[in-house]
């Protein structure tokens, strides 16, 4: 049969950890300020928070509840539509008009440049022939 010291040696690490934890917690409680000291330090913050919450409750009871939307949308969908902007397909025709206008301008510029380059090449070819 195992004796008591041999049985305790099996648990030497858990006993050591429990002893150190107990000492640390006791030291922390001894050195920590009391609850009253904490309340004395933070009383302005606690009072202002309580007043703010009381104002929310009072305004919640005084102001009328929001009216249900006529269209039957869920709450918040109106603001989501506003933030998201119009659907993408509604922007497509405007984009196409702008893009086609830019493409036409680019085509005209390219045609002018090509014509100028052709005329320049033709003039150079005539001068080489002479």
Image (tube, grey):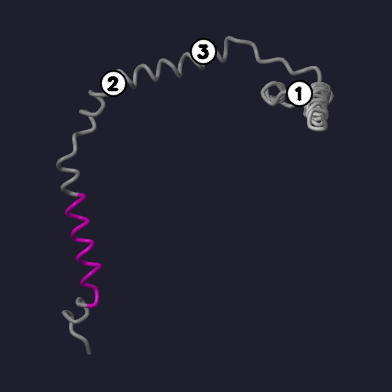
Residue 71 is situated, as x and y percent measured from the top left of the image, at 81, 20
Task: Say which quadrant the C terminus sits in.
Answer: top right
The 10 Å Cα crowd at callout 2, few under 14, some 14 to 19, many 20 or more, is few
Question: Mark 2 or mark 3: which comes first in sequence?
Answer: 2
Residue closest to the eye, 78 or 36: 78
Q: Is residue 69 visible?
A: yes
Residue closest to the eye, 68 or 6: 68
Point out which mark residue 86 bears: 1
Kindly report the secondary structure that dominates the magenta region of the rendered protein.
Answer: helix
The Cα–Cα distance between marks 2 and 1, rounded to whole angstroms, is 50 Å
The Cα–Cα distance between marks 2 and 3, rounded to whole angstroms, is 22 Å
Point out which mark residue 58 bears: 3
The Cα–Cα distance between marks 1 and 3, rounded to whole angstroms, is 38 Å
- Left or right for 24, reference 91: left
> Which residue is depicted at the point 23% across and 63% down?
17
Whether residue 93 is situated above or below residue 5 in the rendered picture? above
- Left or right for 3, reference 96: left
Whether residue 116 is situated above or below residue 22 in the rendered picture? above
Residue 50 is situated, as x and y percent measured from the top left of the image, at 40, 19
Residue 16 is situated, as x and y percent measured from the top left of the image, at 19, 65
The 10 Å Cα crowd at callout 3, few under 14, some 14 to 19, many 20 or more, is few
- Left or right for 22, reference 129: left
Residue 51 is situated, as x and y percent measured from the top left of the image, at 41, 15
Quadrant in the rendering for residue 30: top left
Residue furthest out toward the front: 130
> Which residue is depicted at the point 20% across and 55% down?
22
The residue carrying mark 2 is 43
Whether residue 3 is situated above or below residue 76 in the rendered picture? below
Q: The magenta stretch spans which residues?
A: 10-25
Q: Are marks 2 and 1 in contact (CB under 8 Å)?
A: no
The 10 Å Cα crowd at callout 1, few under 14, some 14 to 19, many 20 or more, is few
């Amino acid at each position: 049969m195992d004796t008591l010291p041999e049985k305790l040696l099996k648990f030497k690490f858990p006993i050591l950890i429990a002893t150190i934890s107990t000492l640390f917690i006791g030291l922390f409680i001894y050195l920590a300020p009391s609850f009253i000291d904490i309340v004395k330090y933070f009383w302005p913050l606690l009072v202002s928070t309580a007043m703010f919450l009381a104002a929310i409750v009072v305004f919640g009871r005084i102001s009328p509840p929001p009216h249900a939307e006529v269209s039957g949308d869920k709450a918040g969908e109106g603001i989501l539509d506003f933030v998201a902007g119009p659907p993408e397909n509604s922007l497509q025709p405007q984009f196409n008009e702008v893009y086609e206008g830019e493409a036409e301008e680019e085509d005209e510029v390219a045609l002018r440049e090509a014509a100028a380059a052709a005329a320049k090449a033709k003039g150079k070819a005539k001068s080489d022939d002479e």
